[in-house]
Image (tube, rainbow, N blue to C red):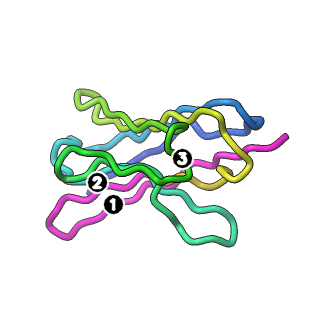
Amino acid sequence: QVQLVESGGGLVQPGESLRLSCASSRSINRFNAMGWYRQAPGKQRELVAVFTWNGLTNVADSVKGRFTISRDNAANTVYLQMHSLELEDTAVYYCNAADGIGNVYWGRGTQVTVSS
């Protein structure tokens, strides 16, 4: 069973930064997609940034230029560096991974709250 564990969330003010981490119990090289989604209160879960099967990244327009996804294969960890946080970024952020044979894994999520 694959476990994805997020960390790094918290309460920040607008304009500040946070870095989220997602540690995988399986080598992340075995996933064909891995990244971050978020869900704000009363809204559907949405893609934030992911590494796709061909090694490229897919980043939501709402966070382009502010958020960066990166990975450390040796540490089996994917990161989400978030800069210039806005009130609208408040959400639970989930790590997601897919192995390409029909299995999709989710972490439990980490809360990010942006408030003045």
Which residue corresponds to mark 3? Answer: 63
Residue at position x 40%, y 59% in the image: 106
Mark 1, secondary structure of its residue: strand
Q: CA distance from mark 3 to mark 2?
A: 28 Å
Q: Is residue 14 above or below residue 36?
A: above
Whether residue 10 sits left or right of residue 26 in the image: it is right
Q: Say which of 7 and 85 sits in front.
A: 85
Is the residue under label 3 in contact with that under label 1 (CB below 8 Å)? no
Residue 50's mark?
none
Check the picture and name the quadrant holding the N terminus. Answer: bottom left
Total residue callouts: 3
Q: Say which of 31 and 1 sits in front.
A: 31
Residue kind at label 2, given as amino acid type:
Val
Camera-nearest label, 2 or 1: 1
Mark 3, secondary structure of its residue: loop
Camera-nearest label, 1 or 3: 3
Q: Say which of 85 and 106 sits in front.
A: 85
- Earlier in the chain: of badge 2 and badge 1, it is 2
Q: Is residue 16 above or below residue 23?
A: above
Question: Which residues lie in the magenta part?
Answer: 95-116
Residue 105's mark?
1
